[in-house]
Amino acid sequence: MVNKSTAYLFFGILLAISVFITIIYRSNKAPTFIRLIPDRITIFSPDTPRIYNSNSFSLFRISKQTIPFISSLITGLLKLIKKSSKRPLQKHVKLNHNFPETNSDIFLKIPTPYDDGTNWIGRKNQATHPSVIQFDTEWNGYKYWMTYTPYPYGNDKKENPSLVSSNDGVNWVVPPKVVNPIISNRVIPSYLFDSYLSDSHLVYNKDKDELELWYRYVSNRKRNEILYRVRSKDTIQWTSPEKLVDDSNNLLQYVSPSVIYEEKKYRMWIMRDWYIYYLESYDGKEWSNPVPVFSGKKPIHSWHPHVCKIGNTYYLLNNDNDTNTGAGGKIYYSLSDDGIYFTKEKIILSSTGNGLSYDSTGVYRASMASGPQGFFLYYGQVSINYQWTIGLSTGLNLNKMRGMDKAKLNRYQKINSDFISNEERCQEF
């Protein structure tokens, strides 16, 4: 007897083949290709180069009129097939002595609103794209705040901006009365598998004493890319989403925005067509023309950049890659006095490729904080099992970072638990 999963798979394959034949027959000549990458069908055009690695391949030419329909349909079929078949997960084994010291040996236990449905220890901690800001003193009870997007096994329907906080930069919690995700993509019919949210970023507006959460909305079907923000004074009550930038009929123009509010204006760095650009605005809606950002007098190639300011210095953390699949990648840093001309990039770390670590498959966008103990480098990790987590490396010097391991993490957790216990004892008297 054929089970339901097999029947769905067989039906899906037959339907896909019939659609393919119809499109090939009816398509006119157009320099547009449809390409297959893991778990997603994505449209590729010659005017957006370097999106895919050598593992991707062209299937056939299609007309531009059929792109929206076929993209949504095939992606939906892939999601259905993937959901109906569960693969066993490999176990995380002990690392060998060749493991790079700069790379994190653990993932941070960032509490997410989603369970990935497996039995591994990080089932509720699959998160990516960290954006961390810090305060000299506690703001609404915490010194460190992070927004991230949940991303269990690359499921972009759960890539909804969320918020956590910390007082030591290592142990993160959901603050009281905060409900994650802060923003979710509920308005899009789930069967379209077309749109998603991503690339959330935190901004502190000192003039208004408000935390702003910026994020990116993408519709592959409509080829829309929009930047939104929500604002809050207490992280509990948030304003309605406010549209800031609407780039219609285009993609890859406002990827991984980094925003700093200073001198009564917003300064923003983005990845546009695989290079970093800078813009500024007084209200977040009317922006200056983008200008390229340089490192050593050369434009900076990037996939997901992050810019922060510590003291009078701008730090650029550049996740450089040639693919959008999460595979491979390196993280560089460079410095600047003006946010446009940066020093020559220096590498901090890259994916290990050893098949054992949590970043064995790839590394992703990074963020940073600093303090008396040195730098905290938070970065996205992708394992061989396609688990997306956030790693941490620390050090007094960005040239000599050391990855967080279980021993270090246990020390931080003990210090944090002792601190909480002391607070509780004080509250009893």
Image (cartoon, grey):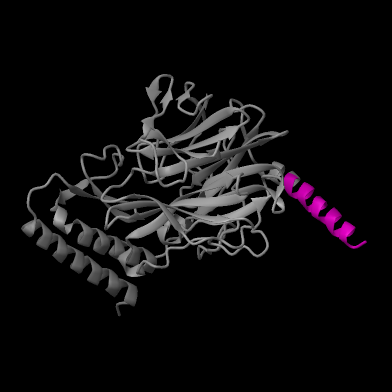
Position of residue 365 in the picture relative to residue 402 (left or right): left
Q: Does residue 100 show up?
A: yes
Q: Does residue 101 show up?
A: no
Which residue reaches farthest right? 429
Q: Position of residue 338 (x, y in %)?
A: 50, 26
Q: Indicate the quadrant containing the N terminus: top left, top right, bottom left or bottom right.
A: bottom left
Residue at 60% across / 49% down in the picture?
208
Q: Position of residue 172 (x, y in %)?
A: 65, 52
User: Between residues 104 and 203, which one lies in front from this camera angle?
Assistant: 203
Question: In the picture, residue 185 is in which quadrant?
Answer: bottom left
Residue at 25% across / 50% down in the picture?
249
Question: In the picture, residue 56 is in which quadrant?
Answer: top left
| Segment colored magenta | 412-429
Query: What main secondary structure does the magenta stretch of the protein show?
Result: helix
Residue 78 in magenta stretch: no
Residue at 45% across / 27% down in the picture?
340
Q: Where is residue 390 in the image (x, y as percent from the top left)?
A: 55, 47
User: Between residues 83 and 165, which one lies in front from this camera angle?
Assistant: 165
- Image position of 191 with respect to 323: above or below: below
Q: Indicate the quadrant containing the C terminus: top left, top right, bottom left or bottom right.
A: bottom right
